[in-house]
Image (cartoon, helix red, strand yellow):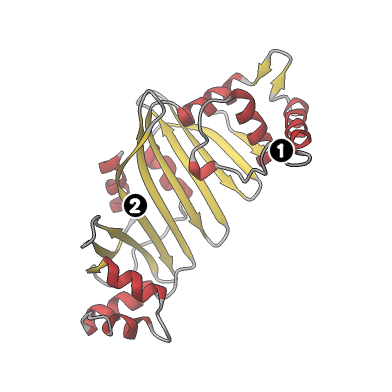
Amino acid sequence: MTRSVLTDVEFDALWQRLAPGPTPVALRLPSPGCAAPGWHDVRRAGWQALRARGLVSPSGPDPETVRLLRLLTGPGRRFELRASWPRAVRAVAAGGSDAGVLAVRQDATVTLEPCGSLTAAVLGVLPRAGPGPGTACTVPSAVLTAALSDPGPCLRIALTTRGVARPEAARLATMLAARPGQAQIVATEVDGNGVARRRGGVLAVLDGPDGRYLLTRTTGSGGWSTVAPIDRHRLHELLEEVA
């Protein structure tokens, strides 16, 4: 199984030269724009580094790397992940029934490797964690958003003052108290014209010292938010439902 590790500059230079399509949002690198001083020099340095590493020859870029890059924007299913543990991690798993690719951006590198199951690939980016204690709790999304935006000295009190019953407020405050690790996963489907359409909502994974929780929200002005303990098997099932 071929695995390519590129610097962010190499990835950007290769992507711009191949122009396979719009860069997936999760892999998009900060760009100063073509008018910025030194922009062309940076791209040229990236291309030269690819040559020095044997990823570009006189006949062109490495064919396997090109194939993996094109899978990222080709028609099919796609998962995009944005996470922090606490270092920022971005990942895209994309492809169809016969071929897939996992791209992981962390620090100043982008790693590309072929994959079979897109669900298993994106789950593999998450650290392993068991479900946290407690039971599922559902409250209006507007209430939860307001309480999290302005929790004051105590999230439980912020929730109760907004009408959440004390037992539910206590459970929510416990589940949301410490979140050293968190991730958002979105599923999309890309058509033959390169247009991506979201499948399902955003799955927010919250990792605390006592285990993992999942935050989901229904859409609409009167939407609801649910926080519940989640294990790896159940998270796999939820991703399969939108894959």
* Label 2 sits on residue: 202
Percent position of residue 157, x then y: 32, 86
* Label 1 sits on residue: 35
Q: Is residue 133 visible?
A: no
Q: Is residue 92 left or right of residue 88?
A: left
Amino acid at pointer 1: Ala
- 75 lies above or below 146: above
Corner quadrant of residue 175: bottom left
Which quadrant would the C terminus be assigned to in this image?
top left
Corner quadrant of residue 149: bottom left
Percent position of residue 203, x then y: 34, 53
The residue at the point 25 percent across, 42 percent down is: 241
Outermost residue on the top side: it is: 59
Q: CA distance from mark 2 to mark 1?
A: 36 Å
Corner quadrant of residue 111: top right
The residue at the point 76 percent across, 30 percent down is: 44
Amino acid at pointer 2: Val
